[in-house]
Image (cartoon, grey):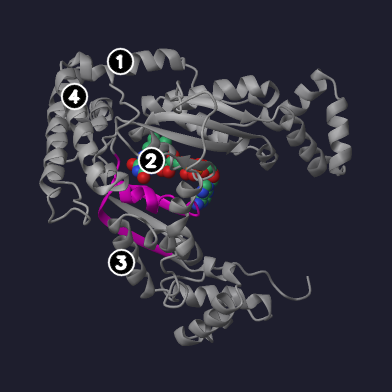
Amino acid sequence: MTGLSRRVYLLRARDLSPETIAVAFAKTSRSPEPFDQTAAELSDSKSAQFHEKWVVGYGHSSVAEHAVLHIAVENVSRLAIECIESNRLASFTEKSTRYQKWSSGAFVVPAEIAGGAAEKPFRDACEFLLAAYQHALEAVGGLARRRFPRLEGESDARWEGRIRSSYVDVCRYLLPAAVVANVGITINARALEHALRKMLSHPLMEVRAIGAEIKRAALAEVPTLVRYADENAYLRDTPERFRKASGGLGIPGANAEPAPRGWMKLIRSDPGSEDLALAAAGVRFCGWGFAESLIRIRNASAGQKRDLAGSVLQSLDDHDIPLRELEYVNYAFEALMDQGAYFEVKRHRMSSQTPGPLTCELGYLTPRWIDESGFRGEYDAAMRQTASAYQAVRREHGPEIAAYLVPNGFLRRLVLGMNLREAFHFCRLRSSESAHAAVRVLALQAAQQIRSAHPLLGAHLKTDEKIRWEELEKEFFC
Ligand SMILES: Cc1cc2nc3c(=O)[nH]c(=O)nc-3n(C[C@H](O)[C@H](O)[C@H](O)COP(=O)(O)OP(=O)(O)OC[C@H]3O[C@@H](n4cnc5c(N)ncnc54)[C@H](O)[C@@H]3O)c2cc1C
């Protein structure tokens, strides 16, 4: 040491504004001063000037990542939450459809139809679904109480807590995307700027209004860093441009796109990528050049490769994150899942996700307990009636507005890209007994296909193996 002693401390958000913290960190790039001294010399207006010059003017945008906000958003539709949560560089917690219940009237009427002829049918369709949801809670809740009777000495509250998710998980299939929820967001100013651009360019008025309100609230804390977040022509116009450009595309020999069968279908993986991951580990741990490392790995015997794979994966326990080198192994899945399951899968920010539109056109799933509780007739009637209300709104107002009516039980297409490192996390977390049955099926199917595509590394993928996905599917769904 040179007489300088190590210091570690917090710049406290209680004492300094987010923009000042960001400048105090940014200045270390050119100034030898300690952070707290730099911060003490700053004012809000000096910080604003710095951000105008460096972040806005010269594009030193990563500085804005040091300014972090916690944004509370209440009573917005779950459809709007999809756009909010599509921002992967942020943290979210939202009202759960597994642990909370919805009551009558708890939905958004989109501004596009409020006051017009479609408002009443829209309200009626949502109220009809919420009434069916309440009836289902009684019917399926009754079945749950019969299947899992009260334990000796168990209070009402404890009994309800123990069995609640077993029947609420089933009834959620009736909730439309218009129902409201709260979401807490923690996000840095750079990610927020992009999120605001997306929201302000969104086809739904509700999302644009939420974007404007978030921007207003954020400006009080970060007056410079999100000031230029506005509607963006590229984001706004690309969907229509693509639809126009795709007008002439056809499928030789077929009239319509066949609906994919199955839940999670592996559509792309590279058989050689296991070698890439091991070769990268050779660069990291043995100091070899990558090309040289790859030759060594490719020439290794099957037994040597198994040992190498074991050396990096065998000792992982449930809370360990596997080596980054697993990111060289990539998968693309085409998945078809109910909207409720999609809402959970979309939370996996380390994956790449392209959802298809939310529609009533791919059919819906029926949980077995809906049938066994004697509720099937009302359930099917609710789904059929909603599908026809959906078509009516779609004809008049387009698919984006009609999506508000789609209940969680309808199927949604998702292209899901993930690397093996994320697959380790997804498959273990989402196959566990505490996960929703629909998501467990997806995780178990993904794991099965990964193990078969990449047996060397896939052999170390951990899932809850107490049940096979085929049994789970049969147990939970009709
Ligand atoms: C039993 C259970 C109950 C749940 N209940 C709710 C609920 O009530 N409400 C709700 O909103 N959500 C709920 N969730 C969803 C949960 O909060 C996560 O959003 C979801 O499981 C995605 O997991 P993840 O963040 O670990 O994964 P990913 O986003 O896929 O990330 C993969 C890994 O990358 C790392 N990582 C990613 N982003 C960050 C980051 N910003 N900071 C630090 N590390 C990061 C972590 O190691 C993470 O495990 C629940 C999940 C489970 C399993």
Q: Which residue is mark 1?
A: 478
State yes or no: residue 355 in magenta.
no
Q: What kind of residue is marked 1?
A: Cys
Where residue 179 sits, quadrant-wise, is: top left
The structure residue drawn at horizontal position 63% and vertical position 37%, both measured from the top left corner, is 322
- Identify which amino acid the numbered label 4 is placed on: Tyr
Q: Rate crowding at label 4 as few (under 14), some (14 to 19) or many (20 or more) other CA atoms within 10 Å.
A: many
Q: Is residue 369 above or below residue 161?
A: above
Mark linked to residue 379: 4
Task: Specify whether 431 is left or right of 71.
Answer: right
Identify the amino acid type marked 3: Glu
Q: Nearer the N terminus, badge 4 or badge 1? A: 4
Residue bearing mark 3: 213
Measured in 3D between alpha carbons, the distance from the residue under mark 2 to the one under mark 4, in whole angstroms, is 23 Å
What element does badge 2 sit on?
loop
- The residue depicted at 32 percent of the width and 36 percent of the height is 359
The residue type indicated by label 2 comes to Pro
